[in-house]
Image: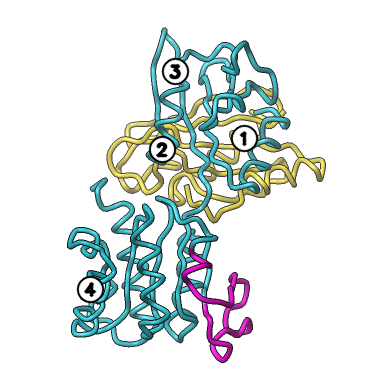
Amino acid sequence: MADGEKLLELAAAWVGEGTGVAIATVIETWGSSPCPPGSQLVVNTRGDFRGSVSGGCIEGAVVAEAARVIAAGKPTRLSFGVSDAMAWEVGLACGGEIEIYLEPLT
Amino acid sequence: MRMSLLGRVVRDRRLKKPVALVTELGEGAQWLVYAEDAEDAEEGGERGEGGAPTGLPEFLVREARDSLESDRCQRLQAGGRDYFIQCFNPPLRMILVGAVHIAECLAPMAELVGFDVVVVEPREAFAQEERFPGIELRRGWPGPILAELELDARSAVVSLSHDPKIDDPALATALASPAFYIGALGSKKNHRGRLERLAGMGFDASACARVHGPVGLPIGSRSPAEIAVSIVAQAIEARRGQAQ
């Protein structure tokens, strides 16, 4: 991840503002993928997000899923790839596959 | 992730203390692993006998420390469970010796790439904060200042002053450290002279070979900003090139 990004600090600040927050982390990639494992995105229940897990292809889907994860209070794993059913909507133009760990702050 | 654990990671980053976060991807249990045993913690504070985090297999502690060392995240399977190790290392540092025009271009570029930048300049006329907004500027001679900065394997040093009495002590201090990148601005002719002076100070050929000079990747840079790009690129290559 880019050391310059203060994503976790931002996540902590969001919690301080009283909004629900989730953290998405790339845990595995196959083939071409712009964000290496460890890349993170933070998102809150207002729909604000910062950081990146794919270079733009799947951020929308991750943000949508985050609302569910925050409501449930439990982490989940998400996979995206060209063979995925979601590919038609959010597919990875680069042709790679990504697995993401999405966890709520509790 | 629990808020208490996030709070610790945020605090550690502020203190520039390396820490690895180990996550068991099934149930979501998490542990923090530090370079030093005694500080390891599970979910924000609990600790087992002897300082080891409770419930975290010993080999995962070792893997987490290896990850910190190599600055790489890892995915591991063990005992039917799936783990991810995330590294939070402090930023790389780049020390610029000489607050010259190229330093004005190089400092913000290096910050953008993720380096913590420190500019060192003994000459009052050059050491002007307004030329380096938001960048740490230290007035004084590079020898003692670089010694204070405790250069480590996450440090880069670039001498830019063109003045041997400023550049040479900086390069000597850098060569005596495990800095991962050392560069010196100047022509090929100047560089030969510099290497001779370093040899005279007792640095052998393999030590002198650590100094990149003329500094920067050969991309035909001409302007100060272009030269800054070539230097940042060479520092990235020094850090990441082996991974290719």
The three-letter amino acid code for the residue at tag 2 is: Glu
Specify the chain shown as cyan. Answer: B
Q: Secondary structure at mark 1?
A: helix
Vertical placement of residue B205 versus B89, above or below: below
Q: Are tags 1 and 2 found on a single chain?
A: no
Query: How far across and how far down the image is residue B225, in percent?
Result: 39, 81
Q: Share a chain, discs 3 and 1? A: no
Q: CA gap, disc 1 to disc 2?
A: 32 Å
- Label 3 belongs to which residue? B82
Q: Which chain is tinted yellow?
A: A
Q: Residue at x 42, y 17 (%)?
A: B59
- Specify the farthest residue to the top: B79
Name the element at disc 4.
helix
Residue in the image at 36% along x and 69% along y: B171
Q: Which residues are magenta?
A: B121-146
Q: Is residue A103 magenta?
A: no
Drawn side of residue A48 relative to residue B150, left or right:
right
Q: CA distance from mark 4 to mark 1?
A: 57 Å
Q: Position of residue B142 (x, y in %)?
A: 48, 72
Question: Which residue is identified by label 1?
Answer: A66
Q: Chain of mark 1?
A: A
Q: Which residue is mark 4?
A: B195
Tell me the element at label 2: helix
User: At numbered mark 3, what does the secondary structure look like: helix, strand or loop?
Assistant: strand
Tell which circle, 2 or 3, labels the residue nearer the N-terminal end. 2
